[in-house]
Image: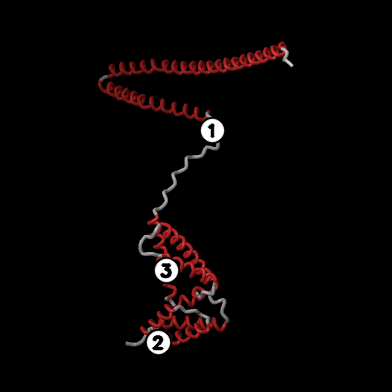
Amino acid sequence: MRPDPAAFHSAAFADGRRLRERSHRRRARHEARMEAHMARAEMHRARHMRRMARRRAGRPFAAVALVLLLFVAAAGGAEQALNVAMFAVLFIAITAITGPALLIGGAAVALTRRSRRRGPVAAGTAPIPARPAAPPRPEAAWQKARARFDALRAEYAAFECDPMAVLHRPALADVSVASTARFVDAFAEAQALDTDAFPPAAHATSFGSAVDRAERAWRAAVDAADRIRLSGLSPAERGAVERVIKLLTTARDSDNDAERLAAYTRARAELAKLDRTGVIHLPHTAAAALDDAARGALPA
């Protein structure tokens, strides 16, 4: 079925009329805005002209006052002329200083008012992120990991060579304690990956990760040993350990050679008994350190 031409033309004329009316309304709004803008501009211009007129009105008075002062100075003599000249110089200096200051102050006030009229900064704008730091060089990271492992190894060796430390933290020398066993495994893994020279990148990365695990395991084992201490021992076993600690303290602090030697001898015997029964697991390095201390206590 063909469309009706009359209906088609009627719709077209209606659309055209709506478009013309919309254009007229838009033009009227634009003209109203322009008239308001011109009115504001005229108001600012009139205000500026009034300010300029007030300034011009004040200038003749200053000029007349200055001329009168000069006449008075001429009539009053040299001393009066000198005073008036000094006053005139001071007046000119003050005018020269305050004029630019007032101008700068007025400009600052105008800029402040203008900034207040502006809307706030659009929300959601984020500052430009800083450039991320460059990753460390593989060799530098390996050297840092090796230094950390050397420090960990020294701390572990110092514990194993100190009988008093073993007696205060027996769980740290007992691999049947879970935290100590985890540390021993992590330490052995890092020890196996340690090299004297810089290895390939993958090996260096594995070594750094192993050192991280060993450090965490060491801290966990130390914390667990501090919590456990002698709590897992029977009263008799705890008393035996405390006796050994007292004997070692006496041997360390005594000035008497015989007393020191006797204390070391009894401490070694008690420790050997505790080690045989499994109460205290004394590392070989701690036993060797105790033997060296006992030999040093022998009189020359």
- The answer to which quarter of the image holds residue 199 is bottom left
Q: Amino acid at mark 3?
A: Arg
Q: CA distance from mark 3 to mark 2?
A: 32 Å
Disc 1 residue type? Pro
What residue did someone put label 2 on? 261
Q: Secondary structure at mark 1?
A: loop
Q: What residue is at 55 percent from the left and 15 percent from the top? A: 35
First in residue order: circle 3 vs circle 1: 1
Q: How far is disc 1 from disc 2 in space, using C-alphas? A: 85 Å
Badge 3 marks a residue whose secondary structure is helix
Q: Position of residue 295 (x, y in %)?
A: 37, 85
Image label count: 3
User: x%, y% of residue 65?
Assistant: 36, 17
- Quadrant position of the C terminus in the picture: bottom left
Q: Which mark is residue 120?
A: 1
Q: Position of residue 45 (x, y in %)?
A: 48, 16
**Which residue lies at the image location 56% right of the left edge and 79% below the top edge?**
233
Name the residue rendered at 42%, 72% in the picture: 157
In the image, 101 versus 262, the foreground residue is: 262
In the image, what residue type sits under mark 2? Leu
